[in-house]
């Protein structure tokens, strides 16, 4: 099939290739000193917009791994117009994602009807112990500023 | 002072001390060269941080790390043999340097039977490997050790036969004698005397066989079956750790050094370079030899990072079906040429 | 052949009365006694043994949704055979009663059935008579139970409460009405 | 039969002595061993370096996906299935999606089908590049690994750019591909169509993949030592392979010209021109060659698909809560490792009643106890590696 004609020519071709590569510039990146910018869509970490969340629990229900823990309570809010009725609004007490359990499927981000969850491509949040992989709502909210603009789309 | 230096034993001790210091140091350089060359052949950078620029201190750092590690001996191991094996391997490679001439005078002992001594001392290391393989009480190690033994039987013969051609041509078994023979002009054109190493004086076949057999002797790819990371998980080295592993490791590179030095001396003219006066050779001899050795070491590294590994039975068949008949032909050819010319 | 033709053709070859080709999947129902014989008949036509597995049809369920209408309690053993020329394939199916879950082995016909039958044996507790190796394939030695039976609970879902129950504390005097109906609670 | 094969090998190989009587030794490879790609264990009985019997022990990575699927909804299972064979995550999703779509009676729009096809072929390329590179490593050559993985990284980067995941794309949705997701900048939902520059980058990457295939010919396939190690080693005869369910490139290397991409219309492969490479002998060398040719065919398909990429929607109309009508369907697809299929049994609920996962590697390595008898210890590694299995695909 690919039988070399002259004995040893196959060996010589391989040697030539490695010798050529020896003098080429390696394409590696010197992590952690240099860093690649991850693609905007990369599923690195989930960011939470606390204000947008209405404690509807959809994300916690649709999560395949049951790794989102939400608690909330209702609060009376002053009426939006003077003389209007006071409104009740659900307020978030707890929103934890256990990244030790999360399988980064992104279903929570997709089902969120109020646009409170976002993917951020940040990836440097490994921890020494499994228990500290649980991010509370303050930590999740901090990721929000790392959420990039979505990439431009290919013209159809 | 000069009287002291002329004392045979003092001089010998001094030379041995130099060997014992220089060989490990050079081996470290070769280890670093292997790390870097292999990395760049694979589109990588290799060691980068240790020691600042280029990661030059990586072999030292590795050595320090190995020394700190616990010296583990398996429960079922044959303890004295297990502990002694790395020393046998390291000693056998160091012993070869006794006869390697770095310059006309810089040689520990120029034996008349230097060639025999070098090959005998070099293959002695395989006994250490067999000891390591047997005493580790590990099936992988055992197979690795036995493969090394089988390899020795297959490759010692072509190795010796390949050298015979050179010995016939030089008419001596002394290493310095062989270099001196290569320093003699082959022929003269007018005023220019043409000097050629034995490689270019018809010993091409001998040289190729020697290099192949040398790779097998050193257990380097494509003949690294006794180690074979992917199947035997480092073979006879599996159970070694810490300082004892370091000894094996150092012995591998010291072995590369010693075998390359033998090859450079026998086939490439050793410390001799045409056009230099004997005084200059006395000073530059070690540099010239090291340059030739480095070239051979590069080739060994180059092969390792290009070729896959052969199978034990294929190696045997190459040795017995091809190399030994070829080496014998080479001897006959050299002898006829010697008589006729 | 399209799937319905294939189902009819192969059912005719093995002499089976029942076959289906719903959703493009040809399936032939073989009586338990003729299981091995049917495979032997089909082997020259369908030499490729794709897989063998089983379904536990059960009304008592520890996992998944409860049955809407009762099903006939049985194990259904499926084996998929195919050819490697036109892509014809068929699933052979037979029912094994729950009180005596055993079936003759196919190892003599298709060597590849070996591991698949071992898997089904440990996962469903079906005995394959004459199988050369009955050791566990996946499960550790001494594992009790048959994990793919519907009555086998999934421990990770048993020990942890579902975090999706609505846990919004109502206002004083207000009753919490929307417990777990799946609809998002919009802002008023 | 075993004795016959042993005798044949004894007779054919001069270097093996028959007269020497040696006691059998049990050699245990794995579960932690550099050549078993994870946690496969082989208990081999060896006579010298010759194998007299071998028993693969699997199950160290059994994650019970078939059980887990019974407590999950269909959209949730998508995230599970791309972890079966993680080297080609995207390709695993396709047959499951098509199976559910068939049960629901919907079909993905053409653009979604083309995107699925392009990414599947790229997953095939990345999977085969892993094989092309790691197989020489098992035979002792370390350099091809880095050369091929360098190019695989380009392909993975492209997959990540579209889907957001290098290994676990989780990009397919029932009825198409992921149409939209929360994506920041206050926008409600962001369309997940191909990002700008994807087509041009892919074209370039395909050229580079073809180049690295040429490099692999120089470095591996043309190398006399490699040929010596693999030719005639681990021959799977056609009949034996089919009986054991060996599929994909492993079966094609044995000379079976069969490809589910041609016979089963699960993606619009009929629109493209490509060949089915088949080997002649079914040995390790053929298996290597077939995979290399499949990469070249895959780059061909990707180029054609990019040129013919239709516009339109990314997803068909599907209800918000997905309930699948009762029924049974089996859909198989030509995955890089072989035939991958899902038998979905629905009772009409939000999750399957039973999901049988037919993974290629499981059947592919089930032939090992037969195949390895009479080989030498170094050939265990050569044969094992040439079957190109992933333990996640074996154990599920």
Image (cartoon, rainbow, N blue to C red):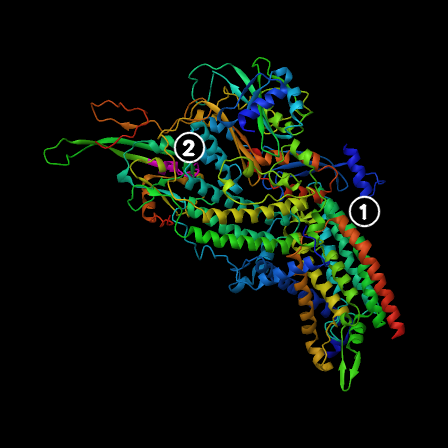
Q: Which of A99 and D101 is in front in this view?
A: D101
- Asked whether the viewer can see residue D105, the reply is yes
Residue D247 appears in which quarter of the rendering? top right
- Residue drawn 27% across and 39% down? A52
Tag 2 subunit: D
| Marks 1/2 same chain | yes
Give the number of the disc on residue D15.
1
Residue A34 appears in which quarter of the rendering? bottom left
Tag 1 subunit: D
Q: In this view, does B10 lie to the left or right of B63?
A: right
Q: Which segment did they paint magenta?
A: A95-109
- Residue drawn 64% across and 21% down? C38
- Residue drawn 69% across and 58% down? B251
Q: How far apart are marks 1 and 2 (CA)?
A: 58 Å
- Residue drawn 60% across and 48% down? D292
Compared with residue D163, is residue B190 higher up or lower down, i.e. above or below? below
Residue that label 2 marks: D75
Give the image location of residue B134, x and y in percent. Answer: 75, 45
């Amino acid at each position: 099939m690919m039988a070399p004609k002259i004995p040893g020519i196959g060996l010589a071709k391989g040697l030539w290739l490695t010798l050529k590569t020896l003098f080429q510039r390696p394409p590696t990146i010197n992590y952690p000193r240099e860093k690649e910018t991850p693609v905007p869509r990369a599923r690195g970490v989930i960011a939470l917009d606390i204000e947008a969340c209405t404690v509807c629990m959809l994300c916690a229900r649709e999560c395949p791994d049951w790794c989102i823990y939400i608690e909330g309570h209702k609060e009376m809010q002053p009426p939006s117009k003077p003389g209007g009725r006071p409104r009740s609004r659900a307020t978030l007490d707890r929103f934890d994602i256990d990244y030790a359990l999360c399988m980064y499927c992104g279903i929570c981000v997709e089902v969120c009807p109020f646009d409170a969850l976002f993917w951020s491509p940040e990836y440097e949040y490994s921890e020494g112990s499994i228990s500290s992989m649980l991010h509370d709502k303050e930590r999740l909210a901090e990721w929000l500023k790392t959420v990039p603009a979505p990439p431009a789309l290919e013209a159809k | 002072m000069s009287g002291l230096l002329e004392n045979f034993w003092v001089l010998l001790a001094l030379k041995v001390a130099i060997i014992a210091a220089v060989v490990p140091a050079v081996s470290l350089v070769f280890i670093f060269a292997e790390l870097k060359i292999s990395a760049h052949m694979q589109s990588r950078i290799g060691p980068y941080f240790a020691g600042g620029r280029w990661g030059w201190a990586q072999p030292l750092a590795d050595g320090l790390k190995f020394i700190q590690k616990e010296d583990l001996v398996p429960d079922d191991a044959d303890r004295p043999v297990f502990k002694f094996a790395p020393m046998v391997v390291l000693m056998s490679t160091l012993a070869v340097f006794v006869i390697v001439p770095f310059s006309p005078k810089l040689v520990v002992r120029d034996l008349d039977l230097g060639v025999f001594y070098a090959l005998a001392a070099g293959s002695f290391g395989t006994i250490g490997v067999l000891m390591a393989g047997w005493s580790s009480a590990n099936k992988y190690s055992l197979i690795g050790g036995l493969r090394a033994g089988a390899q020795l039987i297959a490759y010692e013969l072509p190795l010796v036969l390949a050298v015979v051609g050179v010995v016939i041509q030089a008419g001596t078994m002394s290493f310095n004698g062989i270099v001196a023979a290569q320093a003699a002009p082959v022929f003269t054109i007018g005023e220019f005397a043409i000097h050629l190493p034995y490689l270019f004086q018809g010993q091409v076949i001998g040289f190729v066989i020697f290099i192949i057999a040398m790779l097998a002797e050193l257990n380097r790819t494509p003949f690294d079956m006794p180690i074979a990371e992917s199947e035997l998980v480092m073979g006879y080295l599996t159970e070694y750790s810490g300082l004892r592993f370091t000894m094996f490791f150092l012995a591998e590179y010291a072995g590369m050094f010693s075998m390359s030095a033998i090859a450079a001396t026998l086939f490439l003219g050793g410390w001799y370079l045409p056009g230099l006066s004997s005084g200059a050779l006395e000073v530059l001899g070690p540099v010239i030899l090291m340059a030739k050795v480095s070239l051979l070491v590069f080739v060994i590294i180059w092969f390792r990072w290009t070729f896959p590994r052969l199978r034990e039975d294929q190696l045997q068949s190459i040795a017995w079906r091809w190399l030994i008949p070829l080496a014998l032909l080479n001897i006959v050819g050299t002898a006829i040429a010697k008589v006729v010319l | 052949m399209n799937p319905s033709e294939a189902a009819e053709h192969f059912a005719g070859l093995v002499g089976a009365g029942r076959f289906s080709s719903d959703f493009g999947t040809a399936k032939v129902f073989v009586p338990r006694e003729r299981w091995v014989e049917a495979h032997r008949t089909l082997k020259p036509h369908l030499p490729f043994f794709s897989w063998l597995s089983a379904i536990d049809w059960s009304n008592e369920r520890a996992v998944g949704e409860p049955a809407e209408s009762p099903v006939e309690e049985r194990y259904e053993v499926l084996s998929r055979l195919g050819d490697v020329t036109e892509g014809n394939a068929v699933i052979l199916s037979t029912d094994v009663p729950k009180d005596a879950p055993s079936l003759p082995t196919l190892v003599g016909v298709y060597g590849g059935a070996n591991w698949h039958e071992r898997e089904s044996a440990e996962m469903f507790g079906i005995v394959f008579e004459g199988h050369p190796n009955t050791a566990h394939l996946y499960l550790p030695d001494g594992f009790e139970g048959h994990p793919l039976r519907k009555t086998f609970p999934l421990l990770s879902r048993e020990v942890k409460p579902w975090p999706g129950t609505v846990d919004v504390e109502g206002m004083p005097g207000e009753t919490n009405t929307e417990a777990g109906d799946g609809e998002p609670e919009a802002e008023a | 039969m075993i004795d016959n094969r042993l005798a044949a090998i004894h007779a054919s190989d001069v270097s093996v002595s028959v007269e020497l009587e040696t006691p059998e030794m049990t050699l245990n490879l794995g579960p932690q061993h550099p050549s078993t790609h994870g946690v496969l264990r082989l208990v081999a009985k060896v006579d010298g370096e010759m194998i007299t019997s071998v028993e693969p022990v699997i199950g160290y990575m059994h994650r019970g996906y078939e059980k887990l699927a019974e407590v999950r909804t269909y959209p949730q299972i998508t995230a599970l299935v791309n972890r079966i064979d993680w080297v080609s995550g995207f390709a695993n999703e396709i047959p499951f999606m098509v199976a559910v779509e068939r049960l629901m009676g919907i079909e993905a729009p053409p653009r979604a089908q083309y995107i699925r096809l392009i990414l599947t072929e790229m997953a095939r390329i990345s999977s085969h590049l892993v094989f092309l590179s790691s197989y020489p490593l098992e035979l002792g050559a370390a350099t091809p690994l880095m050369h091929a993985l360098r190019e695989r990284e380009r392909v993975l980067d492209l997959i990540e750019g579209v889907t957001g995941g290098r290994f676990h794309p989780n990009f397919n949705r029932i009825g198409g591909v992921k149409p939209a997701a929360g994506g920041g900048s206050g926008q409600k939902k962001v369309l997940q169509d191909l990002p700008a520059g994807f087509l041009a980058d892919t074209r370039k990457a395909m050229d580079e993949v073809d180049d690295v295939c040429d490099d692999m010919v120089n470095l591996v396939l043309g190398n006399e030592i490699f040929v010596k190690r693999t030719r005639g080693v681990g021959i799977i005869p056609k009949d034996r392979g089919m009986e054991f369910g060996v599929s994909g490139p492993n079966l094609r290397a044995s000379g079976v010209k069969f490809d589910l991409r041609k016979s089963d219309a699960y993606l619009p492969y009929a629109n493209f021109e490509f060949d089915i490479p088949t080997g002649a002998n079914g040995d390790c060398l053929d298996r290597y060659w077939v995979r290399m040719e499949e990469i070249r065919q895959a780059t061909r398909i990707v180029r054609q698909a990019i040129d013919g990429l239709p516009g339109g929607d990314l997803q068909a109309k599907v209800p918000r809560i997905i309930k699948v009508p009762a029924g049974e369907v089996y859909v198989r697809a030509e995955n890089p490792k072989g035939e991958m299929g899902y038998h979905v049994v629905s009772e009409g609920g939000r999750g399957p009643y039973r999901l049988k996962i037919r993974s290629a590697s499981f059947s592919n390595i089930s032939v090992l106890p037969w195949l390895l008898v009479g080989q030498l210890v170094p050939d265990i590694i050569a044969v094992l590696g040439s079957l190109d299995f992933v333990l996640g695909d074996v154990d599920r």
